[in-house]
Amino acid sequence: MTHISIIGTGAMAQAISGIVTKGGNTVELLGQSDAARSITGDIVVLAVPYPAVDQVIAERPGQFDGKIVVDITNPLNFETFDSLVVPAEGSAAQVIAEKLPNSTVLKAFNTTFAGTLASGAVGPLPTTVLIAGDDSDAKATLSGIVSAGGVKAVDAGALKRAREMEALGFLQLTLAASERISWTGGFGVAA
């Protein structure tokens, strides 16, 4: 059994929490009022908007060391909603990894909506969580948790693949925000 700390309490945090507990693992949700509480999980999920990540890291110095940190953010320009705010050759996950050099950073959950995580389906397809990272053991651990929770997991490659995942997440969000797809729809992976 793995204990997971989720920083954030919104829809995605709740959906990820459901997957974690369904698979027999334990979870703690940490909201804005919990900044003084220490992180107790072996895995930490950053379920906050990308602009909040710096504050979350600053409020918890050293608490991410030695942990698997899962970045679920999509680094959108929230003012214009028409671009990503990270360098063209980089990603939010890579930026976070640079800020947390004593952690193992993975990118996951950013290409799914809360509704598809909770239901386990995207239309007729099973919900698939893409996982990118440079540590195969960490990816296998997260993949096992996701799979035990009833959702499909696919290894998307090295952490540098987070850039493409973030572009896909951005496209999906803009399609949903413009009502071209529903918030319970999205992209599925058929294998």
Image: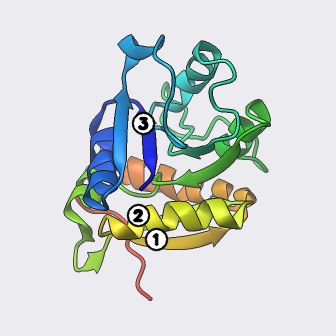
x%, y% of residue 81? Answer: 48, 35
Please give the residue where the numbered disc 3 appears in the rendered image: 6
Side of 125 where 56 appears, left or right: right
For the residues marked 2 and 1, what is the alpha-carbon distance in whole angstroms? Answer: 6 Å
Side of 69 where 134 appears, left or right: right
Task: In the rendered structure, find residue 146 and report the number of the disc placed on it.
Answer: 2
> What's the residue type where badge 2 is placed?
Val
> What's the residue type where badge 1 is placed?
Ala
Mark 1 near mark 3, Cβ–Cβ under 8 Å?
no
Of badges 2 and 1, nearer the viewer stands: 2
> What's the residue type where badge 3 is placed?
Ile
Helix, strand or loop for disc 2: helix
The residue at the far bottom in this view is 191
Q: Residues within 10 Å of mark 3 (few under 14, many from 20)?
A: many
- Res 182 seen here: no
Helix, strand or loop for disc 3: strand
Please tell me which residue lies in front, 29 or 85.
Answer: 29
Mark 2 or 3 closer to N-term?
3
Q: Which residue is drawn at 27% across and 69% down?
A: 122
